[in-house]
Amino acid sequence: MEIKGSAVKSIVEFIKKNHPDSYQDWLNSLPEESKRIFTEPVLPSNWYPMNESAVIPTRHLAELFFNGDMEKGAWESGRYSAQSALTGIYKFFIMAVSPFFIISKASRILSTYYRPSEIEVIEKGDNWVLVDITKFEEPSEIIECRICGWIQRALEISGAKNVKIEVRRTMTRGDELTELYISWD
C-alpha cells in the first residue's frame, strides 16, 4: 500500500514545527528503510510505501512526543496534515462549502492520499454522516487515526464546530470494513 508524498511530508513539517529541537532525535530513532525516505527530499507528488513512510514514523513521533499515545500522536499528525493541505485557495474553498460537501468528496480525497483505497457515504442526517472505508489493503490503527484527525480538522476549517468521530467498526480488528460516525454542531 502507498501514501502520497504530501502526507509523508506533513509528518516532517509537523515535527519541525512543534518539536524543532527534537527532529534529529526522531529521525535517528527510525529504522534504516524509513530513515532513508526522510534523508532525501520528500516529493509531494511521489508515492511512498505506507508502512515505512507513515506508520513507523508516526509511531516513533507518538513515542517521542506523546508519551507513547499512538492514537493521540497519529490524530494530531493527521490534523496537522489537513491544516497544511488546506491552505491558500483551498482554505477559501473549504470555508465556502458545507461539511456534507467535504464528506461527499471523501472517496476522491482518500484516494488522493492512499492507494488503493475506497470510502463511501452510507447514511447522513442533519449534522452527522456515516462513512465506510471499504478498501484499504494494509489496515493500520495509526493510519485510521491520521485519517480521522484529517477529517476532523478539514470539517473544522469548513466551519463545523464540536466535530466528533467515532470508529464503530475497524478492519484493524478484523471487521470487513472501517465504519466512521462523524457528527458536528
Image: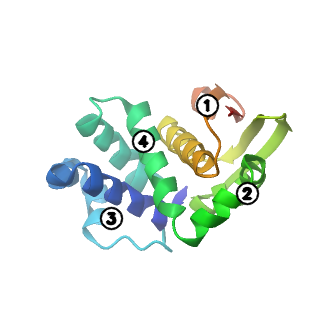
Label 2: element kind:
loop
In the image, what residue occupies the spot 58% across and 72% down?
Answer: 89
Please state which of the two labelled residues, at mark 1 or mark 3, is closer to the viewer. 1
First of labels 2, 3 by sequence position? 3
Q: Is residue 149 left or right of residue 71?
A: right
Mark 2–mark 1 distance (CA, rounded to whole Å): 19 Å
Q: Which residue is mark 4?
A: 76
Query: Residue type at mark 2?
Result: Val
Label 3: element kind:
helix
Q: Which residue is mark 1?
A: 164
Q: Between 15 and 95, which is closer to the camera in this rendering?
A: 95
Marks 4/2 in contact by CB < 8 Å: the verdict is no
Q: Which residue is mark 3?
A: 37
Q: Residues within 10 Å of mark 3 (few under 14, many from 20)?
A: some
Please tell me whether residue 57 is drawn above or below residue 39 in the rendered image: above
Query: Residue type at mark 1?
Result: Lys
First of labels 4, 1 by sequence position? 4
Residue 172: x, y in percent? 57, 32
In the image, what residue occupies the spot 28% across and 72% down?
Answer: 40
Marks 4/1 in contact by CB < 8 Å: the verdict is no
Q: Which residue is mark 2?
A: 97
Marks 3/4 in contact by CB < 8 Å: the verdict is no
Mark 3–mark 4 distance (CA, rounded to whole Å): 21 Å
